[in-house]
Each structure stands twice: as C-alpha cells, then as structure tokens.
Amino acid sequence: MNKSLRLIVVLTVTAALSGIILAFLNIYTAPRIELNANKTLSEAVGYVLPEKQTCEVKVIGNVTFYIGKNANGENVGVAFVAEGDGFQSRLRILVGMDPDMTKILKIKVLQQAETPGLGTKIENDPTNKTDALWFHKQFENLPLANQITVVKGKAPDKDKSQIQAITGATISSKAMTDIINAAITTNRALYLKKAK
Amino acid sequence: MANSKVTYTKEFFKGLWDENPILRMVLGTCPTLAVTTSAINGVSMGLAVIFTLVMSSLMISLMRKMIPNEVRIATFIVVIATFVTVADRIIAAFYPEISKSLGPFIPLIVVNCIVLARQEAFASKNPVGRSVIDALGMSIGFTLVLLVMGSFRELIGNGTIFAKQIMPLSFTPWMAVALQPGAFLTLGFMIGIANWINAKGK
C-alpha cells in the first residue's frame, strides 16, 4: 500500500472505531447521566421547599421557576436557580422562597469550585463540628426587609437580613449574597407579575 | 527498555518504585497536584488512570505493527481519548458525586503524559502481555502516590482521612496543606524522600 494512503486509512479506521464505541456508550450512559442531574435537582427543590409534595415547573422569561404545591394543591413556595461568579468559580444556588417572595425558606448550593477548605464552606464546612452546613443555614427563614448583607466580627442581625461571613472566605460569602440578592430582585418582578 | 529477559514481576514492580511515574520520572504532575486535596479524590483519579492506561496499552500493543510511524502520536491520542471518555461517562453515570469533585481532571487524563509516555516508550514496542503488565505497574504506582499524597493533605489540611476524623478535635487544620502551596510542598518532600531512600540504598 502506498505510504500516505496507509496513514489516512489507519487514522480514519481508528477514529471511526472510536466514534462507534463512544456512540454506543452514549446511548447507554446518557439517560442515566440525565436522570442523575434531574434527581439532584428534584432533591434540591424538595430540600429548599420543605412542605412541597408536588412541583410545577413554569418558565417565565428565561427563568425556570419550580412552584411547590402541598397535598391540597396550595402554593407553598417557589424556587429558582441563582447563578453568578464566586471568588474563583461559577456558583449555582437554588433559592427557595415563600409564595409572596418576602422571605427565603432555604437555599442549597448546586455547584461551586471555590478554594478548598475556605470558600467551599459555603456548601459544607467540616471544620465546624456542631453544624457543617451553618453558613447556608443562615439564609433559612431570612426575612428580606433589606438586601442581604454580610457582616464580619459581630453577630448578624437576622431582622436586618444580615449573615455572618466565613473567616478567610469573605469574597465567596459576599459573592453568594450578591448573587442571591440580584436573582431575587429580578425574579421577584418576573414572577409576581406573571404568575398571578 | 524492551528487554525480553526482564521478568514479568520485574516489569510490574518497576512502576511501583524504580520507574515510578511521579516519584522517579516526574510525569503527570498536573493531576497529581490538583486532585490530591483528599484521599478519595486521589484514589478515584488513580482508578480512572489504571483503567485508561491498561486499556490504551492493550489496544496500542495490539495495533503496534499497523500504526505508521508518522501518525503514531495522533493514533495514540485517539485511542487514549476514547478510553478516557468511556471512563468519564461511566463515572458521571454511576458515581455522580466523584464526577462532581474531580471535575475537568478526568477528561484531562487524555493529555496526562504518563499515559502517552507508556504508549510511546513501551506499548508500541512490546507484546500485549508485557504491555499490560507494564501499564498495570505504572498506573498502580501512580495511584499509590496519589493515595499517600491525598491522605496526607486531607489529614493535615482537614484532620480526616477518607472523611473519617483521625486527628483529635482540638487539632487546628493547616489549611495551606490542602491548598496549592501544600500540593507543591508535599510532592517536593515525597520526591526528596524517595531520592534519599534510593541514595541510601546504593
């Protein structure tokens, strides 16, 4: 066989075989990967809307709202994903709010890749032996009289929507509140106007 | 290196120490530094590399007489990328937690020099059995180093190993060891200790 023809044949056959293998693998794994993603999300929605029994998904503008209903079909809260830049990574946070969007019920960090051991405490803080989830639990039942602000070195005042920053991760803490504030402001306008 | 007088046992054990990819050849340091923030991350990464390296060496060794010299690197990369994608998708489908914590470092095994180096230096010149043994030794050597590094950094940086509390609760974790400087220091000391042991043996 001619030399340059051989180069073409070997590479083409290898690439084609590889393509076939990957195509079959994808048929097999893609549904499972999607299932995992859906499961993670629906578990997260269940977490941030504690009274939810069923969930209605509504897209308003380009935002997806997860509207939780209890057994009687009453609206028990609404959740949405807030997204933005943290200290060194993209943060995706699921925010659960009451139906009138006047206070936060619970939040959950869906995705983050902040500084290990410092910024990652926004999701999970293993150094805090009493409660590893203390940081994002501060958002639970947080009234929204003002924008949420972070405080350092003093006890936060919940009535003024204050939360305590993480030592050594002020930027991550601040970024998280900024992302949540911005998402609440835009989504509240969208949701309360269209949903009613 | 392609010496048929070398026994299979020797072929296997050289990857663990004499030609250990990280400690002796200093290959694949990018994933080594990046993923060893905890023991479980190090071991998961190691397992993915074992799978990729063994399968790639097997394939390349089978194909070694067909691959024209001019396109050998391209062929290696296609074969390696295929197995890395297989590993990545399977981890994402069955172990979503691990997939999340390793992030982009599984796909990046494609450009891990350990894998490519074994194809170029060994699998493309040796019969199948020998190549697989070599790949096993090399990737297990890699995994062991990741395990030791991950455990050490998790222990000092977080007080735990495999998320089990080891240090007394009063121990204040040295955050820096779990961060990037700790990765370089740990690897540096490990290579230093390996060199010291080798020098003493002579």
Image: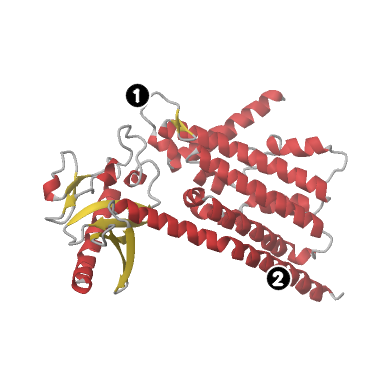
- Looking at the image, which is closer to me, B33 or B52? B52
Q: Which image quarter is the N terminus of chain A in? A: bottom right
Q: Name the residue under label 2.
A: A16
Q: Do the residues labelled 2 and 1 touch (CB within 8 Å)?
A: no
Check chain identity for marks 2 and 1: say if they share one. Answer: no
What kind of colouring is applied to the model shown? secondary structure
Instruction: Give the percent coordinates (x, y) of residue B150.
Output: 52, 37
Count of all numbered marks drawn on residues in the image: 2
Between the residue at mark 2 and the residue at mark 1, the CA separation in whole angstroms equals 58 Å
Instruction: Give the percent coordinates (x, y) of residue B128.
Output: 81, 50
Instruction: Give the percent coordinates (x, y) of residue B122.
Output: 77, 49
Residue type, mark 2 in image: Ala
On the rendered structure, is A76 left or right of B127? Answer: left
Residue type, mark 1 in image: Ser
Element type at marker 1? loop
- Looking at the image, which is closer to me, B19 or A27? A27
Q: Mark 1 points at which residue?
A: B170
On the rendered structure, is A43 left or right of A60? Answer: right
Q: Can residue A111 be seen in this view?
A: no
Instruction: Give the percent coordinates (x, y) of residue A70.
Output: 27, 57
Indicate whether A146 appears above or below A56.
Answer: above
The residue at the point 74 percent across, 69 percent down is A11
Mark 1: give few (<14), some (14-19) or many (20+) Cα within 10 Å. Answer: few
Disc 1: host chain:
B
Mark 2: give few (<14), some (14-19) or many (20+) Cα within 10 Å. Answer: few
